[in-house]
Amino acid sequence: MHGFDYAEIDLIMRAVKKEVENPRDVIFAKSTENSLKMKLAALIEDLTEDHEYLKKNPPPVAKPSAPEQD
């Protein structure tokens, strides 16, 4: 996604995930200086590799912090 801020990207991702059968199979990416210079085939290959890695190695889910006690 190019030209969107993070709040807009979040809304787009949530909307798309509601509409597709397998949302974990959809690749979302924000453009970077590097990705804008890449050839499309190389970019797709790079994104696909990253996506497959993250599907197999999901980042840890942040636990809600406990309220501070006085």
Image: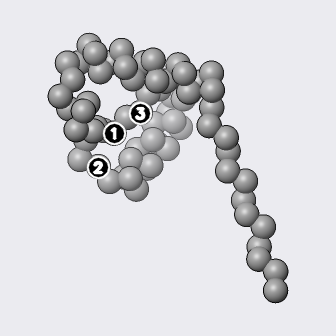
- Up/down of 14 relative to 69, above or below: above
Whole-number angstrom distance, CA of label 2 to CA of label 1: 8 Å
* Marker disc for residue 4: 2
How many angstroms separate mark 3 from mark 2 (CA)?
12 Å
Q: Which mark is residue 30?
A: 1
Counting other residues with Cα less than 10 Å from the Cα at mark 2, is it few (<14), some (14-19), or many (20 or more)? few
Kind of residue indicated by mark 1? Lys
Of the numbered discs 3 and 2, the one sitting upstream in the chain is 2
Tell me where residue 33 appears, x and y as whole percent: 22, 38
Categorize mark 3 by other alpha carbons within 10 Å: few (<14), some (14-19), many (20+).
some
Quadrant location of the C terminus?
A: bottom right
Q: Are marks 2 and 1 in contact (CB under 8 Å)?
A: yes
**Which percent across, then down, holds residue 42?**
28, 15
**Relative to 6, residue 32 above or below:** above
Indicate the secondary structure of the residue bearing disc 1: loop
Depth check: give the residue in front, 30 or 69.
69
Disc 3 to disc 1: CB gap under 8 Å: yes
Question: Mark 2 against mark 1, which lies toward the viewer?
Answer: 1
